[in-house]
Amino acid sequence: MRSGTQFRGAHDFLLVVVPVLLLASIGIWFALRFMHPPPPGTLVLSAASSGSPYYRFAERYRAIFERNGVKLDIRESTGSFANIKALQDPNSGVQAGFVQSGIASKNDTQGLESVGRINYEPVWIFYAGDKFLTRLTELKGKRILVGPAGSGTNAVALQLLTANGISSENASLLNHELPDYVDMLSRGDADAGFLILAPDAKTIERLLRTPNVHLMSLANADAYAQRFSFLTHLFLREGVVDFAADIPPKDTSLIATSAAVLVRSDTHPALVNLLAQALQEVHAQTTIGPSGEQGLFQSPGRFPTQVDPEFAISDEALRVYRSGPPLMQRYVPFWVATTIDRLTLSLVVLLPILIPLLRFAPQLYDWRIRRRIIRWYGELKRLEAAAKRAANADERVKKLEELDRIEATLDNLPVPLTYADQLYELRQHIDLTRRRLASEINMKGVG
């Protein structure tokens, strides 16, 4: 009997605990699935043409992503405008991309966030001839190369020229590919040209070494940086490109754009966090090339930046730059860490629901046990009422036999030890009812 009682007690316990655990599990699953979904296994990044510096950056990011069990899908593009267009198109599948500063309109910033600026891209202004030029206003009336139509170089060049009162009405603005600049300037087919390229670009190196072609040192470079928030004033020191050849031959004031890595605002936070870690690992270093030479405009801690003049910085990126990778990722793999983070966040959301649910479980268990005892009180009350309505002694005797059957059933009633006092109290009431019923049978039988 004891084993049966223990079995029924365990059964009651499970009938209460299992539904509670099931509801809690459903709540956690719902929170994990919809409130804090798992990160996708792939991040799509729009870079540039294969072999370009930005494509090579993306390939280094990919190695870091693969190390963390995530695929980085690199897509070739024609440049910053194409990358912004892909990011703004929800059907493109692109979630991240490189974008040059100075080309985005206010509408372009909607729905996009910056993971940080990763490098400077100087605005190189070369000119041909013997006259020494230091201001863009001096290019009025000249033949000016302004980059391919629709390119980032073209967009920035036109902004700068317009600010100096130069347009197609008072100058010849020529749209050509950047590699064409060397021959056009050296042959005299153009008087000046704008380029936005990294310092180690081959076109820049060729122009710096081309006879009768000079790099403009802007006398009012600080003014441009103050007027246009996306520009920075940089110095190219004498001889820094080639000490032996003394290139450049004097200190040169330049203005520079910068490149940002942008993400869609709806990109999963864990992937943005991982991308910020990749940026920090790749761009925080200050050396380039196998010989360990320092980049011309790099210095420790400058990139990636924690501010962006055009786009809002992602909160996930800021966390990485200020505190490093999430604590769990320092000790466990990326997917384990993100699962733990999601579970923690889900529990925080679900606690207001789970706590009342868990508090209700003991009350439900108590109600189930008490209900089992109270049910027999109802039977006892029904039997007493029927005995009073009995027409003769035989009917009362049958009620007394029924009372005996109730008591026999109670002998096998499984009740936890903590509720035994209520069971014994019920038996006392049964005994009281039996005595009262027997007394009535004797009295009415004698009568």
Image (tube, rainbow, N blue to C red):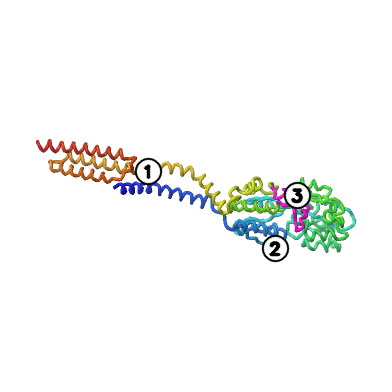
Looking at the rendering, in which quadrant would you find the C terminus?
A: top left
Circle 1: element type: helix
Residue shown at 30%/38% (left/top)?
421
Name above or below for residue 396 compared with residue 185: above
Q: Alpha carbon of mark 2 to alpha carbon of mark 3: how far? A: 27 Å
Q: What residue type is labelled 3?
A: Ser
Residue shown at 88%/60% (left/top)?
211
Q: Alpha carbon of mark 2 to alpha carbon of mark 1: how far? A: 66 Å
Q: Which amino acid does label 2 sit on?
A: Ser
Q: Is residue 196 visible?
A: no
Residue 2 or residue 365, whichever sits in front: 2
Mark carried by residue 299: 3
Task: Evaluate if marks 1 and 3 touch, with contact meaning CB atoms under 8 Å apart.
Answer: no
Q: What residue type is labelled 1?
A: Leu
Q: Is residue 370 left or right of residue 353?
A: left
Residue 237 or residue 413, whichever sits in front: 413
Residue shown at 80%/46% (left/top)?
222
Tag 1 or tag 2, which sits nearer the N-term? Answer: 2
State the residue position of label 2: 50
Tag 3 or tag 2, which sits nearer the N-term? Answer: 2
Q: Is residue 38 left or right of residue 387?
A: right
Residue shown at 87%/55% (left/top)?
246
Residue 346 x %, y %: 52, 47
Q: Give the range drawn in magenta.
A: 284-305
Tag 3 or tag 1, which sits nearer the N-term? Answer: 3
State the residue position of label 1: 364
